[in-house]
Image: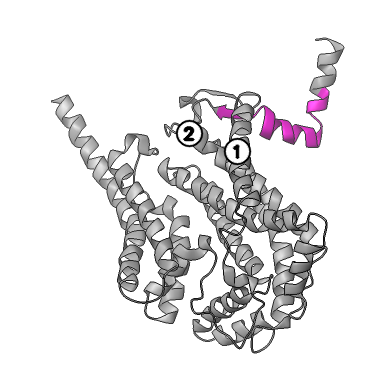
Amino acid sequence: MCIRDRYTMKLLKRPIINVVNNHLIDYPTPINFNYWYNFGLLSAVCLGIQILTGIFLAMHYTPHIDYAWLSVEHIMRDVNYGWLIRYMHANGASMFFIVVYVHLLRGLYYGSYKSPRGLVWGLGVAILILMMATGFIGYVLPWGQMSFWAATVITNLFSAIPGFGVPLVEFLWGGFAVDNATLNRFFSLHYLLPFVLLGLVMLHIAVLHQEGSSNPLGLHGKDIDKIDFYPYFYVKDLFGFMCFIVFFSYFLFFDPNLLGHPDNYIAANPMVTPAHIVPEWYFLPYYAILRSIPDKLGGVIAMGLSLVTLAVLPLVNTSNIRSSFFRPLHRYCFWIWVGNAIVLGWIGGNPVEDPYILIGQVATVVYFAYLLVVIPALGLLERVLIENKLNRLNV
């Protein structure tokens, strides 16, 4: 071995360089990765964009009910490239949820929640829940009409918890209504939680790389050929990143307010209630589940269970086959469920009146039925069908 090779090997054993090499360069990657696997990296890119733009916005934002809305206008009008940073952060949140939802659906389709990746899946659901908390808190900070009233409505939901619900709401508010203390607390949490999220993402990646990545065929361990991540999948991810930047740039430069709500360009007024209070678009399916239950506490429980049921999929799954590539019945059920989730999002953006109430209730039942009934039942049915097929072949 020449001196140069010995120096290179010694360098690769250094602590930080060794981690980078093991996880980003020499990481053994299944050779049959498709472009749906790009969305994991894109999620990390979006998180980086949100943290960086958030730090710059925090330099000029004022967490006070009299100045918050004006400070946002100051950022947009007076700060150099403030409009760009603010629109990157606002639209970056939507991009973050888009890529994470696609990443989640890819995991559902290819059975990434099945053993031995149950912990990886659970950490992913925890990341989603923390993302939603961070996104909701951030939605309040511009202190527009929809920000204020969304904060009032959503935080009020905790009052439905028996026993300590009302004290919990007052603790969140820092008083008896959404006011200056609430805004200060939300700003502090919104600055802190992304770094907690970053830690969870790093843990998610570490556990994933310990168990090994899944693949479209659902094979595991020595059953699948693997190659180094660099340069093969680096180039593939780079192409996906470039496509994402083009997609992101359209919203950023041509239609930056498309995914927002026009009422948030009106300063918060506690004396004027908007005609229709809605959260951001990425919360609408869960908002529809919340509204589909007539009882307040029941709605809160249903909304919470809509996320918890995702986390317990490794426990309720009964199929011996991971990927939907070999599960035609599951493929049909999966795409029906995706369509149902889109319907829930549409219902969440409509008023609480007929026929939207009934449609939302039916869609809520379908949502839970797929996760808690269809997935376990399909696994059992597939076992019976496979056994019958094998018995016929043996005869």
Residue range (magenta): 10-29
Q: Using the image as rendered, state which of residue 206 and residue 180 is in the foreground.
A: 180
Q: Which mark is residue 32?
A: none
Measured from the top left, where is residue 50 in percent x and y? Answer: 69, 54
Q: What residue did someone put label 1 on?
A: 210
| Viewer can see residue 322 | yes
SS state under label 1: helix
Q: Earlier in the sequence, mark 1 or mark 2?
A: 1
| Viewer can see residue 113 | no
Measured from the top left, where is residue 281 in percent x and y? Answer: 51, 62
Q: What amino acid is labelled 1 in the image?
A: Gln
Measured from the top left, where is residue 189 in percent x and y? Answer: 71, 68
Residue drawn at (52%, 60%) of the image? 282
Q: What residue did someone put label 2 on?
A: 215
Residue drawn at (35%, 40%) of the image? 320
Q: Using the image as rendered, state which of residue 84 and residue 8 is in the foreground.
A: 84
Label 1 with label 2: CB-CB less than 8 Å: no
Q: In the image, 189: left or right of 16?
A: left
Q: What amino acid is labelled 2 in the image?
A: Asn
Q: Residues within 10 Å of mark 2 (few under 14, many from 20)?
A: many
Magenta stretch: dominant secondary structure: helix
The quarter of the rendered structure image containing the C terminus is top left
**Colour theme:** one colour
